[in-house]
Amino acid sequence: MPENPPVDFVERPSLIEPVIAALIGRDPLLTVGLAAGFRGAGGYGKSTLARAVCLDPRVQQAFRDGILWVTLGESPENLTASLEDLIQMLFGERPGYSNLDSAAAALAARLDPLRVLIVIDDVWSSIHL
């Protein structure tokens, strides 16, 4: 779960509501996956906006199996470990995959029946996604 927004957070419904609508405004039986992104220079509030969206009760209800937050940073050291962290948070086990491809395939296969929102924060390169 993401951290709470800062104490001086100012609600901005004009920014938050379209994101919530994009996430939960679809028929859950027809939605297989959805990718969305906030892009901009550091310090403009992208992570804060994402936190506010994740903490909205409508979003929490729509993603009943969990809302997970992963922070990568400029040079993620171990993407395989990041995927294993997600597996551990969702399923309570840490399988110990030896490479990124096998960890990604295992996570993808296990996500199929779940309604989960995964937020990947502080992405510097699309290759890390």
Image (cartoon, rainbow, N blue to C red):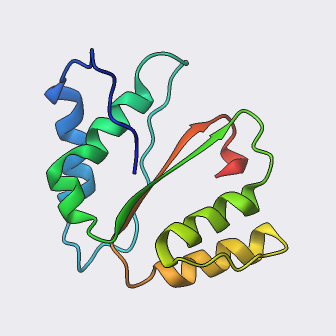
Q: Is residue 21 above or below residue 51?
A: below
Question: Where's residue 65, x and y in %?
Answer: 33, 71
Q: Residue at x 21, y 18 (%)?
A: 10
Q: Quarter of the image holding residue 74?
A: top right
Q: Nearer the viewer, residue 80 or 112?
A: 80
Q: Is residue 103 left or right of residue 34?
A: right
Question: Where's residue 75, x and y in %?
Answer: 78, 37
Q: Is residue 14 above or below residue 120?
A: above
Q: Quarter of the image holding residue 87?
A: bottom right
Q: Is residue 70 left or right of residue 84?
A: left
Q: Residue at x 31, y 72 (%)?
A: 31
Q: Nearer the viewer, residue 37 or 92?
A: 92
**Residue found at the far front of this picture:** 92
Q: Residue at x 45, y 42 (%)?
A: 37
Question: Where's residue 108, x and y in %?
Answer: 56, 76
Q: Is residue 110 left or right of residue 52?
A: right
Q: Residue at x 61, y 63 (%)?
A: 85
Q: How many marks?
A: 0
Q: Is residue 81 above or below residue 88?
A: above
**Residue found at the far right of this picture:** 98
